[in-house]
Amino acid sequence: MNQELILVAGGGGFIGGHLVSKLRQEGHTKIRSVDIKPMDEWYQVFDDVENVVADLRDAHACRAACEDAAVVYNLAADMGGMGFIENNKAACMISVLINTHLLQAAADADVARFFYASSACVYNADKQRDAQVIPLKEEDAYPAMPEDGYGWEKLFSERMCRHFREDFGLATRVARFHNVYGPFGTWDGGREKAPAAICRKVIEAKTSGNLEIEIWGDGKQTRSFMYIDDCLEGIDKITHSEDLLEPINLGSSELVTINGLVDIVEDIAGVQLKRNYKLDAPKGVNGRNSDNTKIQSYLGWEPSIRLRDGMERTYRWIYDEFLARERAGAAV
Ligand code: NAD
């Protein structure tokens, strides 16, 4: 049993919700989960956790959230898939207030560890023009030319973490997540990312009998996707590492094209769909993968859950959610 108070900022979200769940399973008894969303929109809510609805862009809310906390995980951000971040740059950048106020409050509260969730969107766009990618190493973030809006906020917040460590002695740790997916996340409504969006579209096609799918871009863009369980394990190892002071990649190195991802979901669903490519849709960089040399050398570990296995679990969850929503709609 561990009685240190742990703050999960963004605990109503996808990764934050899973983190709270894992901390409970590990025996933590004092967890504070804070999110701006009304609680009935949180993906996972636990009665034995101190659940707080608050806007962490506000400095007072951050002070209250950090009070007595030993460890802070900042997973709160206004974010979504490419369709959201390309069209909401100001909203994404305003999340800088969350991390800034949380850092200040954590330093004042003498928090022992502070984890910040950064993103592969910090990487220089010039290194991601070709679908035949050279995996991104940590130093490829500079010279800086990150994803406009969202990526700039992440890069700036990373540096805030570094300077709070150097100037105020706050033990900050930063991971650059590469596309995390899994159950209990956004799968509809405009903020969903490619794995969930593709699952939903395949399910819609299968259940409606209209055997077509719209794909954003030409489908040849490449990515890697990390299953949530690997992400949680990485967060834990990075947060508690003694020497991982600088931002580090946390991502799978299993590269796949978007067409390849659709192949996997079609196979899981047992259908084959006609593909319609929407070439003017937001599609992000042409190619991106995680170079895991550094995480291997520091932790002797890297994310390893196969995409096919993680997608199978994700598809099943979205399928059940989809059917539950259809049934609820039919009952109205
Ligand atoms: P999510 O949207 O499911 O969770 C983020 C949560 O933060 C949401 O529940 C949201 O309501 C909350 N939030 C937003 N503004 C807030 C505010 N002002 N005060 C309090 N809470 C607020 O997203 P996620 O996928 O769980 O992402 C968690 C973190 O990981 C984010 O920082 C995100 O940028 C980062 N990240 C995620 C991915 C990914 O693939 N999911 C990739 C790279 C980085």
Image (cartoon, rainbow, N blue to C red):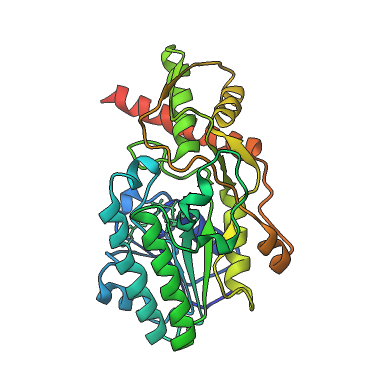
Image quarter of the N terminus: bottom right
Q: Nearer the viewer, residue 234 or 221?
A: 221
Q: What residue do we see at 43% from left, 81% from top?
A: 164
**Would you say 298 lies left or right of 177 here?**
right
The reply to whether residue 134 is visible in this rendering is yes
Residue 301 drawn at (x, y percent): 71, 60
> Looking at the picture, does residue 106 appear above or below residue 280?
below
Q: Quadrant of ligand 1?
A: bottom left
> Looking at the picture, does residue 196 appear above or below residue 106?
above
**Would you say 237 lies left or right of 162 here?**
right
Image quarter of the C terminus: top left
Tag count: 0
Residue 16 drawn at (x, y percent): 45, 58
**Would you say 134 lies left or right of 94 here?**
right
**Would you say 66 lies left or right of 294 here?**
left
Residue 192 drawn at (x, y percent): 40, 40
Q: Nearer the viewer, residue 221 or 268?
A: 221
Q: Nearer the viewer, residue 160 or 13?
A: 160
The reply to whether residue 1 is visible in this rendering is no
Residue 285 drawn at (x, y percent): 47, 43
Q: Nearer the viewer, residue 55 or 172?
A: 172
